[in-house]
Amino acid sequence: QVQLVESGGGLVQPGGSLRLSCAASGSISSINVMGWYRQAPGKERELVAGITSGGMTNYADSVKGRFTISRDNAKNTAYLQMNSLKPEDTAVYYCNLKSLSTHKNYWGQGTQVTVSS
């Protein structure tokens, strides 16, 4: 079993920055993809960014150039640096880990990000 714990959400003004962290623990496959998803009220959950254990990344078009995903494999931790935040970035952000060896999918409990003046 794998546990994911997110931290770093909060309230920030438009144009501000936040850094989310996701610490994974448990039986973690060395070959995996970690990602950040978000869900705004009344909307479906959407992929924000993902990063493989080898460091390959992908981003939603809406966050390209503003958000950066990274990871520290030694700490089993992923990060999402969010800059130039907009009100439309307001959502609950969820950490996800997909094991490419077991095909299992794990989710964190979510952290609220609110962008408002």
Image: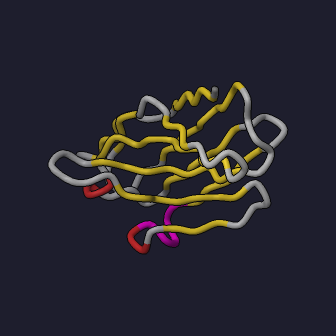
Q: Main secondary structure of the magenta part?
A: loop
Q: Position of residue 18 (x, y in %)?
A: 49, 44
Q: Quadrant of the N terminus?
A: top right
Q: Relative to 113, is 59 on the left or the right? A: right
The location of residue 90, given as percent across then percent down, is 29, 48
- The one of 11 and 99 positioned closer to us in this rendering: 99
Identify the residue at image location x=43%, y=51%.
37
- Residue 108 in the magenta stretch? The answer is no
Report the residue that reaches farthest toward the left: 42
Question: Magenta residues?
Answer: 63-67
Q: Nearer the viewer, residue 58 or 12?
A: 58
- Can you give x and y, in whole percent of width and height, for residue 28 in the image? 73, 35
Taking the image as shown, residue 59 lies to the left or right of residue 15, namely right
104 left or right of 100? Answer: left
Number of labelled discs? Answer: 0
Residue 11, placed above or below residue 71: above
Q: Quadrant of residue 76?
A: top right
- Which residue is at the far right? 74
Position of 85 relative to 23 (above/below): below
Task: Indicate the colouring scheme.
Answer: secondary structure
Residue at 55% of width from left, 27% of height from top? 5
Q: Magenta span has 64? A: yes
- Residue in the picture at 65% in, 58% down: 51
